[in-house]
Structure formats: structure tokens, C-alpha cells
Image: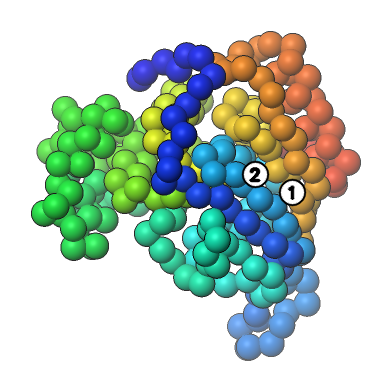
């Protein structure tokens, strides 16, 4: 791993802002009607600046993943508008990458093959094949280019998933609890890895997590959501210098502030952090 130093990062011309405007999501019942209480998100509005790292925290079922899927274009909103830069979101697009908790690698493909999969799907592998080498170096896996997913640790597999998403040069990277399945020590190392990639690429990142410490450690701002139906309870700016000290008074004070906010928003304190 490469240690992070200082508080500067590359500003990428590829990065784009995210705008969510009065968005609500109501899920239909199996018989085609509207199920009472099936409102997942209620009147959510937020803006993420180009190149910003923003984390979303909130209780299970509050619509965090639904919001990411709407920004990815995989789920349409019931009401409201979403856009990337000046372009409205009407469906999936290559300018948005999505990384899940499960890396979902193709087991029959090597590390190189998995990273190149998006280039193959877009029909641009011949012109961009050299980028696979660049991204394998970027995530520190060049020595494992010919290894298959079953040979990889959880952290290594997630780095392949990150490289596979980033090789398409997304303007926005959406991360849905990508480190949630890792052990504590691997998770902390991968937090630094994601931050290093963010600085190297300058990509806008919207990161869903249940881990408050992770949100404080990584983000420029933290969005706190209420229990279902999800609304934005508070947005907190994290003004701590990087690299951040998890044991500092400032870090612990902010952690306490967030726990208190989530408690008053109706979320049980037990199970908030991993």
C-alpha cells in the first residue's frame, strides 16, 4: 500500500457533479398496486461537487443503496430529478461506475481479464489495452495479472473491482459498502487504498457505509439519513487534515456528534459501527 501524505489531490477534468432534486422512491407491490409503507426515499435533495468524496450513513433500509442505484440509472425515481453535471440521468451510462460490497468478479477470467471486461463490452479493448497494465499498477496487482479470483484475498478482489470500474474513466464512482465484508485490518488498509485512488484519479465519489469511523476517516462531507422512508437529517463537513488520526480529540468529538445526531434521528445506537 502507498501511504497518503498531505491534503492535496489531483483535480480531474473528468470529474462531474451530482445533483439530486426532490427525489422520492415508492416501490410497487407484487400485484401492481402501491403497498402502504413502501416509500423508501422521501424528498431527498443534495449536491455533490465535482471531485468531492462524500459518505452516506444511516440505518439499514433507509434507502442509501436505492439512492445510489437511482444515480447509477438502474432504478428510476418516482418523483424528482437527478443529473450528472448538466445531463439528466435517464438510465445507466459509462460516465458512472458502481462498486458493490461483493466484488462480483468473473470467476473464469484472470485479474487482467476482469479489469479489461468493461473495455471488451464497449468494443475498445484494442485501443485501450495498455490501460489494463496502468490500472493493475495503480491498484498494486501487476504481479497477479494472470491469477484467478479464487486465488485472491477479499481485499485484492475488491481492488480488482475498483480497477475494473475506474478503467472506464467514470466521471462519478458510486460505492455501495464496498469494504463491508472485509476484516477490520484489511478494511482500514483498503480505506487508504480508495483514498489513494481518489487522489490519483480525482473522480467524484459517493460512498455508502454503515461505519461512522470510516465515514469520518474518508469523506469531505457526511450525509446522515433518517430511518425509512429515508430523508437527509443533516450534512456534516469534515474539516480534519489528511491523513486523519482516528484517535485524535477532533475525530472522537465528531464521532460523538454524529452518534448523537443519529440517535435523535431515531436510530438505535447499537450496531451503528462495525
Q: Position of residue 23 (x, y in %)?
A: 70, 65
Q: Which mark is residue 245?
A: none
Along the polypeptide, which appears first: circle 1 or circle 2? 2
Residue that extends furthest to the top in the rendered view of this protein: 248
Residue appearing at x 56%, y 38% in the figure: 52
Tell me which residue sits at (44%, 49%) in the image: 171
Q: How is the image coloured?
A: rainbow
Is any atom of residue 75 visible in this view?
A: no
Residue extending furthest toward the right: 264
Q: What residue sits right under mark 1 in the picture?
A: 225
Helix, strand or loop for disc 1: strand
- Quadrant position of the N terminus in the picture: top left
Counting other residues with Cα less than 10 Å from the Cα at mark 2, is it few (<14), some (14-19), or many (20 or more)?
many
Quarter holding the C terminus is top right
Establish if 67 lies above or below 214. below
Q: In this view of the protein, which residue sits in the foreground, 15 or 268?
A: 15
Which label was assigned to residue 56? Answer: 2
The quarter holding residue 57 reads: top right
- Residue 187, horizontal then vertical, whole percent: 48, 28
User: Quick check: 102 left or right of 142?
Assistant: right
Residue 252 in sight here: yes
- Kindly check if marks 1 and 2 are in contact, taking CB atoms under 8 A apart as contact: yes
Question: Would you call the spot at circle 1 few (<14 residues within 10 Å), some (14-19), or many (20 or more)?
Answer: many
Residue at the spot x=14%, y=52% of the render?
127
Nearest the viewer among 9 and 32 is 9
Amino acid at each position: 500500500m502507498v501511504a497518503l501524505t498531505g491534503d492535496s489531490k489531483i483535480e480531474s477534468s473528468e470529474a462531474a457533479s451530482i445533483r439530486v432534486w426532490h427525489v422520492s422512491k415508492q416501490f410497487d407491490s407484487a400485484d401492481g398496486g402501491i403497498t402502504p409503507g413502501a416509500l423508501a426515499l422521501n424528498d431527498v435533495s443534495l449536491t455533490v461537487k465535482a471531485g468531492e468524496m462524500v459518505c452516506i450513513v444511516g440505518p439499514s433500509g433507509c434507502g442509501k443503496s436505492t439512492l445510489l442505484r437511482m444515480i447509477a440509472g438502474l432504478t428510476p425515481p418516482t418523483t424528482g430529478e437527478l443529473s450528472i453535471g448538466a445531463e439528466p440521468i435517464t438510465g445507466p451510462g459509462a460516465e458512472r461506475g458502481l462498486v458493490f460490497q461483493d466484488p462480483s468478479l468473473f470467476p473464469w477470467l484472470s485479474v487482467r481479464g476482469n479489469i479489461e471486461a468493461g473495455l471488451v463490452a464497449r468494443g475498445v479493448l484494442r485501443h485501450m489495452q495498455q490501460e489494463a497494465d496502468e490500472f493493475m499498477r495503480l491498484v498494486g496487482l501487476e504481479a497477479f495479472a494472470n491469477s484467478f479470483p479464487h486465488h485472491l484475498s477479499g481485499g485484492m478482489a475488491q481492488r480488482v473491482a475498483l480497477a475494473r470500474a475506474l478503467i472506464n474513466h467514470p466521471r462519478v464512482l458510486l460505492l455501495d459498502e464496498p469494504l463491508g465484508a472485509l476484516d477490520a485490518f484489511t478494511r482500514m488498509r483498503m480505506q487508504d487504498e480508495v483514498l489513494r485512488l481518489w487522489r490519483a484519479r480525482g473522480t467524484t465519489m459517493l460512498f455508502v457505509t454503515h461505519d461512522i469511523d470510516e465515514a469520518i476517516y474518508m469523506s469531505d462531507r457526511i450525509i446522515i439519513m433518517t430511518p425509512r422512508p429515508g430523508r437527509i437529517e443533516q450534512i456534516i463537513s469534515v474539516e480534519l487534515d489528511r491523513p486523519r488520526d482516528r484517535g485524535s480529540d477532533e475525530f472522537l468529538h465528531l464521532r460523538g456528534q454524529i452518534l448523537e445526531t443519529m440517535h435523535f434521528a431515531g436510530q438505535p445506537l447499537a450496531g451503528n459501527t462495525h
